[in-house]
Image (cartoon, rainbow, N blue to C red):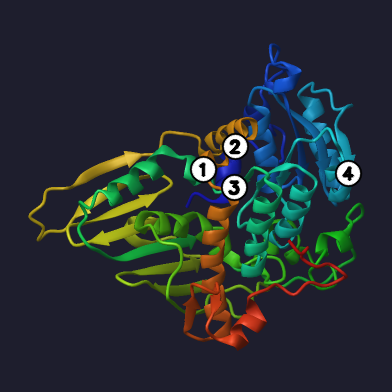
Amino acid sequence: MSTRRDFLQNAGLLTGGSVLASALGNQSFAYFKKGVMPSDRVNIGVIGLNGMGWANAATAMRLPGVVIAALCDIDTTVIDGRIAELKSKNIDTSKIAIYSDYRKLLENKDVDVVIIGTPDHWHALQMIHACQAGKDIYVEKPVGNSIVECNAMVAAQEKYGRAVQAGQWQRSQQHFGDAVNFVHTGKLGAIRNIKVWCYSQSTPMAPKPDAPVPAGVDYKTWLGPAQLRPYNRNRFHYSFRWFWDYAGGLMTDWGVHLLDYALLGMKETAPNTISAVGGKYAEPNAASETPDMLNVLYGFDKFSVSWEQTMGITNGNYGRDHGVAFQGDNGTLVLNRNGWEVLEESRSANKIIVPLNRSVDNGVEKHWINFLEVVKSRDFSKLHCSIQEGAKVATICQMGNIAHRSGKQLQWDHAKKQFTDAAVNAKYLSAVYHNGYSIPKI
């Protein structure tokens, strides 16, 4: 499976002896490029320096005119490591402002664009505050950790008029667009079912004891609006995504990428009904809270969308560990990060078989090129994945998790943008904020 770790390794971005080797190259990369007028430069501040936060920063720095002006993280060890990596490439870091509080970074008038690469439970607050501070924003997916957060993020962008790109970089890959365009031709015939799946090689985590907070970590700030808990390594950095306080498991990690294309292919925004079954089947005593196995069925007027996730098993549908399959009367189009092809129905009189079209481009880089073009042009309609689009699919993923957690078949009220079950809305529509935090009124 093409995992997040695989992506970072392929991009040369994992911490280690060759960190940033391919991403930053030598002194000819964008930070030092000549011929870029000061008025054309974009100063970027990065909030959250692990994983995709740093991958995005490294990608941006390859592009003409981009300057990293500020770095922010609650872990001084991470900050020190990133500075050391930059210095190892003979990069002058003396003008990079360092922060542990993102609000101070947002006060920096030299910062034009903010990357939000923090855990999911921080995305909404930081994006809204960045809009209020007049920054343009590249926010990692999933954009929100609740349906209410997603709606608030959209409202903030519309009120404050900032360019906001969601980090769903598959939106910028040519083969994904080509596949959706083929679906729209109608050659597959009537499409009755769309299968979406992620079979992950990741295995559930064994429990670990609580421990003292590591030196240099501002753990209280990391928790932010989440409830206070003792420090536990299982809940920190990458593995935060397996706990409801901070994220939504594989559904919100991979689901936003893949369910996005189910919606695009069918030109839909939200289902009528949602039901789910799943749990911690691989290891009931695992430390994680989110399910290792989950099947969700989304009902639309004339078709259904099914989501399958399994941890520790990689033998997925059509011999692929992740993907989207549009099943039509004439054939099935199978799509994933490696490419797409059409498998013809044996009884079909229409000869529509299409051989494998392989992926040939760098989606993250193209996503950043698109974003920076919009930052300069201010034509938000050209964003490949606006906050509106990111919120739409993040909401779909939240629906699946809520159906699982509530144990109910749910109906969606399209006009009110909530479930018809008031008790479910009260319990799950909004994340509970703690420690004095609240979503700003937009």
Report the disc number at residue 371: 2
Q: Nearer the viewer, residue 87 or 441?
A: 441
Please tell me the numbered disc located at residue 147. none
In depth, the one of 147 and 73 nearer the eye is 147
Mark 1 belongs to which amino acid?
His
Q: From the viewer's side, name the closer residue of 74 and 69.
A: 69
What is the CA distance from the residue labelled 2 to the residue labelled 1?
A: 8 Å
Q: CA distance from mark 2 to mark 3?
A: 10 Å
Determine whether 76 is above or below 154 in the image: above
Residue at figure coordinates x 43%, y 46% from the top left: 337
Instruction: Identify the residue at the far right of this view.
Output: 215
Q: Nearer the viewer, mark 2 or mark 4?
A: 2
Mark positioned earlier in the residue sequence (2 or 3): 3
Check disc 3 and report its element: helix, strand or loop.
loop
| Image coords of residue 209 (percent x, y) | 80, 72
Question: Which residue is denoted by mark 1 in the rendering?
Answer: 384
Residue drawn at 64 percent across, 30 percent down: 376
Query: Are discs 2 and 1 less than 8 Å apart at CB?
Result: yes
Residue type for callout 4? Tyr
Could you say where residue 297 lies in the image, as x and y percent from the top left? 41, 74
Mark 4 surroundings: few (<14), some (14-19) or many (≥20) residues within 10 A: some
Q: Secondary structure at mark 1?
A: loop
